[in-house]
């Protein structure tokens, strides 16, 4: 999620809320609000100076996507994700690498997609780069544990599963460290 600031009073939009004692414009307007259509055609009331966290739909109202004179959103921090009006295109990549030590528990080796991104992955590729097999638990479910052999890859394509968390163990007799790489396509979610 990215962080945004509403900036209805910018330097190119005239003067409002003038301080009578100094004749200077206040930094944020106490009077100005605006209703803006957000993702999914839902309207959101924005207050001048307000900061909020949401998907990058709101970047289209910021400079340089809009001319400076028309922009009313300022990007405070950008998570790098994209937003498209076509929901199938609202994905961004995420890559995890971890070393699964012998005799560690599932809870010790976690890829928490939902916790890291506030969303889920619609595509996941898990590669066991180690020299022995590992066990993998999907979405924290005891009924969804499988084994992945050495130098093997497991792929869950779009439409197979929505994955929020992966956990790994390496409990095979004589096990050594196993390097694991997880590639994800994470769905962009909007809060508004």
Image (cartoon, helix red, strand yellow):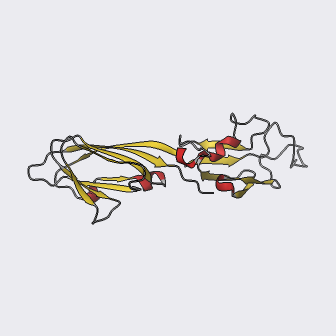
Left/right of residue 118 with respect to residue 106 in the rendered view: right
Quadrant that contains the C terminus: bottom right
Left/right of residue 64 with respect to residue 105 in the rendered view: right
Q: Position of residue 61 (x, y in %)?
A: 70, 42
Position above or below: 95 against 42: above
Position above or below: 27 against 120: above
Residue at the image position 69 percent from the left and 58 percent from the top: 42
In the image, 104 versus 117, the foreground residue is 117
Instruction: Count every numbered label the image shows and give the total.
Output: 0
In the image, 156 versus 115, the foreground residue is 156
Outermost front residue: 159
Q: Quadrant of residue 112?
A: bottom left
Q: Position of residue 145 (x, y in %)?
A: 25, 60
Q: Position of residue 154 (x, y in %)?
A: 28, 47
Left/right of residue 42 with respect to residue 109 in the rendered view: right
Residue at the image position 75 percent from the left and 40 percent from the top: 71
Q: Position of residue 137 (x, y in %)?
A: 28, 58
In the image, 190 versus 54, the foreground residue is 190
Q: Quadrant of residue 96?
A: top left
């Amino acid at each position: 999620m990215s962080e945004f600031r509403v900036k209805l009073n910018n330097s190119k939009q005239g003067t409002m809320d003038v301080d009578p004692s100094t004749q200077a414009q206040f930094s944020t307007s106490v009077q100005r609000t605006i209703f803006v259509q957000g993702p999914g055609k839902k309207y959101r009331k924005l207050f001048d100076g307000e900061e909020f966290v949401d998907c990058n739909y709101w970047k289209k109202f910021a400079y340089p996507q809009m001319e400076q004179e028309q922009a009313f959103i300022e990007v405070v921090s950008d998570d790098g994700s994209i937003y498209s009006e076509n929901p199938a295109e609202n994905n961004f990549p995420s890559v995890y690498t971890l070393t699964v030590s012998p005799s560690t528990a599932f809870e010790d080796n976690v890829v928490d997609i939902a916790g890291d991104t506030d969303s889920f992955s619609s595509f996941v590729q898990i590669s066991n780069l180690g020299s022995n097999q590992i066990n993998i638990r999907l979405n924290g479910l005891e009924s969804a544990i499988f084994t992945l052999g050495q130098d093997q890859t497991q792929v869950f394509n779009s439409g197979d599963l929505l994955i929020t968390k992966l956990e790994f163990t390496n409990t095979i007799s004589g096990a050594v460290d196993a390097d694991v790489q997880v590639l994800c396509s994470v769905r962009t979610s909007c809060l508004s």
